[in-house]
Amino acid sequence: MKYFVYLLECADSTFYTGYTTDIDRRILEHNSFNLGAKYTRGRRPVVLKYSKSFETLSEALKYENYLKTLNREGKRKLFE
């Protein structure tokens, strides 16, 4: 099974970082009425800006944690 860490840009230009096993499904959930993270519910639509795959959940969680420590400019450098 693959794990994906992803970075979304919300409608208010903020970023959201998460992980999943199905990136397409998760993006749809973030943009749907009842699903998705509480943070993104009021900031729709969201757009996938960056993703990276990992073989283990442990690797994915470590990388997600790393992304969350980056400032706004550091996150932008990932996808520009």
Image: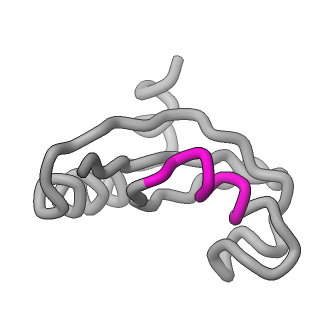
Q: Is residue 47 above or below residue 41?
A: above
Left or right: where 52 falls relative to 58: right
Q: Nearer the viewer, residue 8 or 74?
A: 8
Q: Residue at (45%, 39%) from the top-left corner?
A: 75
User: Magenta stretch: dominant SS?
Assistant: helix
Q: At which x and y percent is residue 63? A: 22, 51
Q: Nearer the viewer, residue 80 or 56?
A: 56
Left or right: where 18 falls relative to 25: left
Q: Residue at (36%, 48%) from the top-left corner?
A: 4
Left or right: where 30 falls relative to 49: right
The colour mode here is one colour
- Report how many numbered discs are placed on residues in the image: 0
The question of residue 24 being in magenta is answered with yes
Q: Is residue 35 above or below residue 30?
A: below
Looking at the rendering, the stretch of residues picked out in magenta corresponds to: 22-29
The question of residue 35 being in magenta is answered with no
Q: Residue at (21%, 43%) from the top-left corner?
A: 54
Q: Residue at (84%, 53%) from the top-left corner?
A: 45
Q: At which x and y percent is residue 25? A: 61, 54
Q: At which x and y percent is residue 49? A: 59, 34
